Image (cartoon, helix red, strand yellow):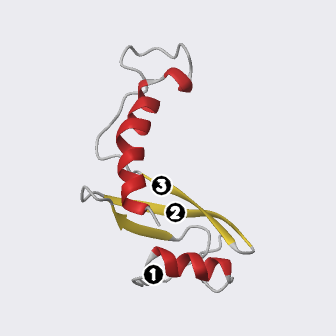
Amino acid sequence: MAVLTQTVTTETAINWEELAQKIKDNTSALKVGDIITEKTLDGEEMDLVVVDMGPGWARFESKDCLPVEVAYNQNNRNAGGFADSDVKRYLNEEVSTVCRRSFAM
């Protein structure tokens, strides 16, 4: 027999400083799988998913954060691996710059 687990969704407005303090104090009530939606400075919405937690810390990863599809390499080859890839350049030059400005604390 299957087990159905249902999750109740609630939305709470919170700033990053307050959330960081609650995480450090172990009072955040965050759970793995929770999603935080934030807007970058250029107006794009970015979902950050809680992927791991421990006493006083939480790890977030972005979910479908690119507004466009980005090819791994324009030449459809993998020579040089991720270190030499076009997608790494795009992430470092485009996405990382916007995220650093948007989420600076």
Which residue is painted at 40% across and 53% down in the image? 99
Of 51 and 6, nearer the camera is 51
Is residue 70 among what the camera can see? yes
Question: Which residue is denoted by mark 2 in the rendering?
Answer: 49
Vertical arrangement, residue 30 with respect to residue 27, above or below: above
In x, y percent, where is residue 81? 56, 21
Among numbered discs 2 and 3, the one appearing first in the sequence: 2
Marks 2 and 3: CB-CB under 8 Å? yes
Going by the numbered disc 1, the residue's amino acid type is Thr
> How packed is label 1: few (under 14 Cα within 10 Å), some, or many (20 or more)?
few
| Quadrant housing residue 9 | bottom left
Q: Secondary structure at mark 2?
A: strand
Q: Position of residue 54 (x, y in %)?
A: 73, 70
Pick whichever of labels 2 and 1 is earlier in the sequence. 1
Badge 2: how crowded within 10 Å, few (<14), some, or many (20+)? some
Decide: is 68 above or below 34: above
Q: Which residue is mark 3?
A: 62
Asked if disc 1 and disc 3 are in contact, CB closer than 8 Å, the reply is no
> Tag 3 or tag 1, which sits nearer the N-term?
1
The quadrant of the image that shows the N terminus is bottom right
**Left/right of residue 40 with respect to residue 34 in the rendered view:** left
* Residue ID at (38%, 13%): 75
Residue highlighted by disc 1:
9
- Please, which residue is most extreme toward the right here? 55
Residue 1 visible at all: no
* Amino acid at dot 3: Ser
Which element carries disc 3, helix, strand or loop?
Answer: strand
Q: Residue at x 46, y 14 (%)?
A: 77
The residue furthest left is 43
Taking 103 as reference, is 23 above or below it? below
On the image, the x and y values in percent for residue 50 come to 57, 65
